[in-house]
Amino acid sequence: MSQSIKWGIVGCGGIAGKFAADLALTQHGKLVAVGSRSQEKAEQFAAAHGAARAYGDYDQLVTDSEVDVVYVATPHPYHLENAMAAIDAGKHVLCEKPIALNAQQTQQMITAAEAKGVFLMEAMWTRFFPAITQVRKWIASGKIGGVLAVEADFGIHFKVGPEHRIFNPRLGGGALLDLGIYPISFASMIYGSQPERIVSTVHFAETGVDDQAVIAFEYAGGATAALSTSSRVAMRNEARIFGSKGAIIVHPLFLHADRLTLHLDGKDAKTVDYPYDGNGMHFEAEHVHQCLKKGTLQSDIMPLTESLAIMQTMDAIRQQWNLKYPGE
């Protein structure tokens, strides 16, 4: 791996634009190529973000010999296809969350990456912010004692029509995969395991996708997580962790946190700010760089075993709802 790590981006939507802009904030990352289903869109994106090459075909992007790692930024149902193409071409892959539509697809991607000897990680950017790194340190050190309860919610009022991707079942629409994955992955990070029991309730949009849900997890020893998600109402978008000695509040928006409040029993609450530049996507990109430079093929912060376990949990939730995506 050269000093400069060269990126290719598959998909030229909004999230891809934010990631491309943040690559400029990293020490070693460089965007060299972009791919879209439209040559015109690829060329516009490349011009906007300084990429040397633009492809109107994903296969050309993943087979570009200059590309070290591919960022997959297409809609959920295409993650498997796009990531597998990059893996088959011998490229390292950072794949947007959710890593796939279900656990079966996730396992397929993991197996392929292991066989090819390439790096693969789900782009759960939340975990790489300095504020969330501090949360993990406080939890690991026993700062608030043993964690007994987690609360987290993520809801956005999407004022869009039924044709929008969030309501389109063929695009993996629904609140769970697009929004609910954040509180679910957060609980997984805090507890380091998946729940032993899941209880949930859901509301469906007219298009048949889930648009609001409340999910309760129970873990070994009686610890709990109370999680909410919605695409039809705005929520607080905050996370709260309660332990035997205190609590941690991750202020809105917890998915890209910049402020924490630490409550310790018998002491005044302490609020700390963790400002950052850009969109905050450079933190996960830098982590990928560190993994590649060390020669590790899996993240220790967002390991593939956990991405798979989270998908299994979401599969179990959807099973309670009798919800399947087209083609499943």
Image (cartoon, rainbow, N blue to C red):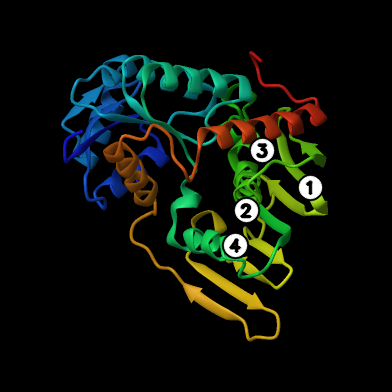
Whichever of callouts 4 and 3 sits on the residue coming sooner in the sequence is 4
The residue that label 1 is drawn on is 220
**Residue type at numbered disc 1:** Ala
Q: Quadrant of the N terminus?
A: top left
Res. 176 mark: 3
The residue that label 2 is drawn on is 190
Left or right side of 253 for 149: right
Instruction: Mark 2: give few (<14), some (14-19) or many (20+) Cα within 10 Å.
Output: some
Q: In front of the other: label 2 or label 3? A: 2
Whichever of callouts 2 and 1 sits on the residue coming sooner in the sequence is 2
Tags 4 and 2 in contact by the CB under 8 Å rule?
Answer: yes
Residue 249 locus on image (x, y percent): 62, 68
Measuring 67% from the left and 30% from the top, which residue is drawn there? 312
Q: In front of the other: label 3 or label 1? A: 1
**Residue type at numbered disc 4:** Ile
Specify whether residue 206 is in view: no
Tell me the CA gap for discs 3 and 1. 24 Å
Count numbered badges in the picture: 4
SS state under label 3: helix
Q: Is residue 186 above or below residue 253?
A: above
Left or right side of 96 for 16: left
Whichever of callouts 2 and 3 sits on the residue coming sooner in the sequence is 3
SS state under label 1: helix
Res. 139 mark: 4
Measuring 60% from the left and 27% from the top, which residue is drawn there? 172
Residue 176 locus on image (x, y percent): 66, 38
SS state under label 2: helix
Whichever of callouts 4 and 1 sits on the residue coming sooner in the sequence is 4
Tell me the CA gap for discs 4 and 1. 17 Å
SS state under label 4: helix
